[in-house]
Structure formats: C-alpha cells, structure tokens
Image: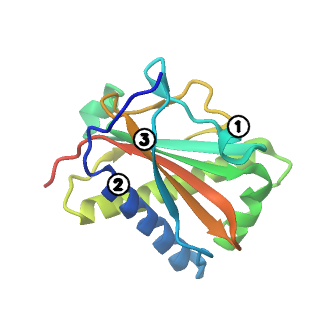
Amino acid sequence: MFFGGSVNKDLEKFGQMLAQSVEKMFVERNGVHFSQDPVLQKKLIIEYGGLMRADGMEKYNEPTFISYINYYLNTKEMEKNKAIGAIVVYIEQSYVTTLLKLLRYPLADDEDLDALADCCGTLCNIIAGAFKTEISNAGYIEPEMSHFTSYRNRAVVGVPFHFDEREKIELSFFIQNTKRLMIDMTMGILPKR
C-alpha cells in the first residue's frame, strides 16, 4: 500500500542529521571519507500489515544484509511496541567484511552468514546511537532505541514504524565512487525539550 505526503515536516532535517552523524562516525573511527556527498532522497513508505517493507534486493540487486533499529518516545511506548521511527541499514553481503575492516572492527568469517548479519547489526547499532545523539544535540527529546534485528535480503515481517508517517529518507553513501552503504530512515514527530 502506498501513502502520500509526510506528517513530520522535519523529516528532511532528520535525514541531514543522520547523514552528518554517519559521515562523522566514519571519519572519527578510521579517517574514512566518502568519495562524494551522501545522496538524500525522500521516498514513499511501502506498507503492508502495518509494517514498512525493507528489501535489500531492491537496493543492490545482489545478496544484502539488512539491519534495523526502532526509536520510541519513551520506555512505556517501547513496551507497547509503538515506534516513533526507524533506521534500516543495507550492506551488500560481499562488502560487509571490507566495510568493517575500513572501520577497524573485528572481522567476521565471510562464509558465516549469521556472523555477517551480526556485523551488519552492530554497525546499525553504532549508526543509530550516533543519530540518537545528533537528535538530542538538536534540542529534541532523546528517544529510546531497540536492539537491532538483522535479515539477509529482506526483512521478512517488515519494519515497525510510526503509522502516521508516509515518507522515509533514503541515504546512499559512496566509497571509491561505488554505493556501499544505504540507510532508510523514518521518524514521526519528536517533541523539543
């Protein structure tokens, strides 16, 4: 099912904050600079069964790991599983170990799919934490974060999101002029502190 329009008028601003936090994290971790500015696009959320579709094959057209983390207004909303937002990280299966090596993280056996999924989830967690800090630094309340969930190729059951939102931000990051990291982000209205 397709929606039209976004409820959160600051969605693009949140997308820019996410892009900045990812760039900053890569530089701080190992001096990694992307070969071009991230590409930020607003896209419609494809929803089914109250969840957002996340399909890695649509991003890379080859085996891909997907990890997502949800944000919640507070712990009570988290207990009710009422997400205010989500980020979804996509990495080509063939590039997971190279990306981790660039960031000086422990390498996984590139034949062990569970280990690679965990690596993608760990990166998703680090990105989500950096983004959470940017949100707070921008004067918004600091949302609660879920643990990561990882899949290969497709988030089979979908990704929880704030159901009033109709749009997401898609970010593409390039290393050596090749798209190597993609992130979808959706965020409902977060109150200011």
Residue 146: which disc? 3
Q: Are marks 2 and 1 in contact (CB under 8 Å)?
A: no
Q: Residue 173: name its quadrant.
A: bottom right
Dot placed on the residue nearer the N-terminal end, 3 or 2: 2
Q: Give the residue at x 66% y 33%.
A: 154
Cα distance, mark 3 to mark 2? Answer: 23 Å
**Kind of residue sitting beneath label 3:** Ser
User: Residue lying farthest right?
Assistant: 111
**Which badge, 3 or 1, comes first in the chain's sequence?**
3
Under tag 1, what secondary structure? loop
Query: Can residue 147 be seen by looking at this rendering?
Result: no
Residue 122 drawn above or below residue 26: above
Check disc 2: other Cα within 10 Å, few if <14, some if 14-19, many if 20+. some
Q: Earlier in the sequence, mark 2 or mark 1?
A: 2
Check residue 171 in the rendering and tell me which mark sits there, or answer none.
Answer: none
| Quadrant (top left, top right, bottom left, bottom right) of the C terminus | bottom left
Check the image and name the residue furthest to the bottom: 31
Position of residue 95 relative to residue 161, above or below, is below
Q: Residue at x 73, y 47 (%)?
A: 115
Q: Nearer the viewer, residue 55 or 114?
A: 55
User: Looking at the picture, how far across and down is residue 10, in whole percent?
Assistant: 26, 52
The disc labelled 1 sits on which kind of residue?
Answer: Asn
Q: Which residue was labeled with disc 1?
A: 153
- Residue at horizontal 51%, vertical 78%? 28
Residue at screen point 77% across, 43% down: 63
Residue corresponding to mark 2: 12
